[in-house]
Amino acid sequence: MYPEHLKTFDYLGLHQYFLTFCTHKRARLFTKADAVEVVLTQISRASAEQHVALIAYCFMPDHVHLLVEGQSDNSDCRRFIARAKQYSGFYYQAAFGCRLWQRYGYEHVLRSEEAAVSVARYILENPVRAGLVVAVQDYPFSGSSLYSLEQLLDAVQLRNRWYSRAA
């Protein structure tokens, strides 16, 4: 059984989401900057179209983690997911000649009591846990569309100063 969207949730508005997209057959496609750049450019394109901010991202060799947030009442996370995978898959196939994504991904709607900082920390520390680097700062395929890596790392270390918004 594959994961499905929540039936009682519309995915519209100012919500935060933790998303994971896996590469087709878990192939190690995100090991070079040119591949990551193609995909990140298209995810960013979908993000701008759907008014969804990329608070934090990390491209691991065979998957990508995203912490995203709707920036307007019209932000549509379902459409963002579909467009991000469609655009990036198309341009990746054109550039590298192979399929990019598995059909389904993982999504988690962050509840008001959940701190985005915990998810951001998990995302940023993933390459360290996997033994790819010793320090978060050493990994070249992590970042944010809103913050510099230094700002993001400061935010992750200082829970109370992380991304606060009215619940």
Image (spheres, rainbow, N blue to C red):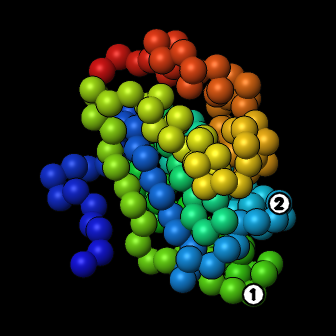
Q: Of 161 and 83, which appears nearest the observer?
A: 161
Dot 2: what SS?
Answer: helix
Horizontal side, residue 90 vs residue 85: left or right? right
Q: Residue furthest left?
A: 8
**Corner quadrant of residue 36:** bottom right
Q: Quick check: 35 above or below 68?
A: below
> Amino acid type of disc 2?
Ala
Residue 24 in the image, given as x and y percentages of width and height: 55, 80
| Quadrant holding the C terminus | top left
- On the question of residue 120 being in view, the answer is yes
The residue lying at 41 percent from left, 72 percent from top is 104
Q: Residue furthest top?
A: 160
- For label 1, count other residues whose C-alpha is less than 10 Å away and answer few (under 14), some (14-19) or many (20+): few
Residue 25 in the image, given as x and y percentages of width and height: 54, 83
Can you identify the residue that label 2 sits on?
33
Horizontal side, residue 97 vs residue 111: left or right? right
Q: Quick check: 138 above or below 14?
A: below
Dot 1: what SS?
Answer: loop
**Corner quadrant of residue 149:** top right
The residue lying at 28 percent from left, 35 percent from top is 111
Q: Of 59 and 88, which appears nearest the observer?
A: 59
Residue 107 in the image, given as x and y percentages of width and height: 37, 55
Can you identify the residue that label 1 sits on?
97
**Corner quadrant of residue 90:** bottom right
Marks 1 and 2, the one that precedes in the sequence:
2
